[in-house]
Amino acid sequence: MPVPESAGFNTRAVHAGQAFEPRTGAVVPPLHFSSTYAQDGIGGLRDGYEYGRGANPTRDSLQEQLAAVEGGTAAFSFGSGLAAEDSLIRALTRPGDHIVLGNDAYGGTYRLINGILGDWGIGNTPVDMANLDSVRDAVAANKTRFVWVETPSNPLMKITDMAALADIAHDAGALLVVDNTFASPYLQNPLAFGADVVVHSTTKYIGGHSDVVGGALVVNDPELADKIGFVQFAVGAVSGPMDAFLTTRGLKTLGVRMDRHSENAQAVAEWLLERPEVEAVLYPGLPSHPGHELARKQMKKFGGMVSVQFKEGEAAARKVAESTSVFTLAESLGGIESLMNYPAEMTHASVKGTELAVPENLIRLSCGIEDVEDLIADLDHAFSFISNGRTGS
């Protein structure tokens, strides 16, 4: 039985695409590993299944689930977030087209657009997405196909007005693409604000357990869906059945996890704000954040990501990053465990020396679901290495 559109988020996350197996009544749908499917005579496909690259029941279940939680009509699951982005760009742009993207975009996204697809004739202009006049000028100056934004952005936690960007893009005949990885579908649904395509690294909050890599695209427009679906099939960067299964399992608990991530991040951000070593705390849940009021309108809560800058510069940031025990020094984010990242040398090393470069006095925290008292105690211990001038271990 289909899940009603009026159902709440957690109901959709648990039940969309997850009908019980009819033969045995198994509550969890079986995991389908088959790479090919028997035909009832030439061209006699059962439920449209022919070959695993084109369709797989486990991946189809995940795609139905993703569309339901993002408020879209179609979703596509890929082997990674960058595979999803690459397929989107190849599906909907041609040589000579242009992408206007945030000047604080994820380093991997910029590397793909500038370093890979630039050689194939796709241009780009990084701009401050909060400056709508700059966005409008950049869109008008080129044959712009996409306005591409992250909100909150990675790792500067900037908040962008999606409805305003949608108007600018649509007035110019362009599409608004929103990377919703940091917020997740539980906290924010960009399609409801006029976005045309939502991008996810499902590796992060949707998977939620740091054990599977994946990506997704979600749309409402049937024409866009047909074009993306063709590239997904023709290029083949699809998620495998085990990856799809793990992602589905993670998505079922996204709502309850995001509540805890958000609560922990809020407490950590407020603690950081009182520390004398700190130059700035970047978290939209703080009233002092320049995007706080806009975030309140666009988001249910403020998410689990916090960035912090240190008065004593790069040395202090490095000492803290290398001195924690509950926070693990690692790339990625959005898992149940807390992670610490030094973006300038890790996730955003590819944009060093460009206008997208991350401040060297900044660390990024992905606040997990541990007891928040332990997270704060861990940070307090790490901060002692700044004041004492010691080297962390």
Image (cartoon, rainbow, N blue to C red):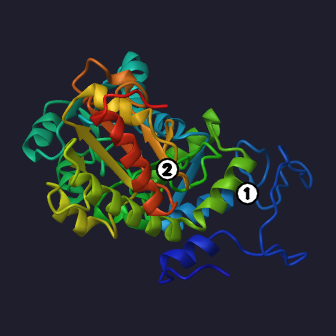
Q: 135 left or right of 74?
A: left
Q: Where's residue 227, x and y in %?
A: 50, 45
The numbered disc on residue 144 is none
- Residue 5 to residue 286: above or below: below
Q: Where's residue 379, x and y in %?
A: 39, 47
Q: Amino acid at mark 2?
A: Ser
Mark 1 residue element: helix
- Depth check: 269 or 4 in front? 269
Residue that carries the numbered disc 2 in the rendered image: 338
Query: Can you see residue 52?
Result: yes
- The quadrant holding residue 278 is top left
Residue that carries the numbered disc 1 in the rendered image: 58
- Residue 234 to residue 7: above or below: above
The residue under the point 22% across, 31% down is 126
The residue under the point 47% across, 84% down is 6
Q: CA distance from mark 2 to mark 1?
A: 29 Å
Q: Where's residue 382, x and y in %?
A: 39, 41
Mark 2 residue element: loop
Q: Residues within 10 Å of mark 2 (few under 14, many from 20)?
A: many
Q: 352 left or right of 87?
A: left
- Depth check: 37 or 148 in front? 148
Task: Please identify the residue farthest to the front as the structure is shown.
Answer: 388
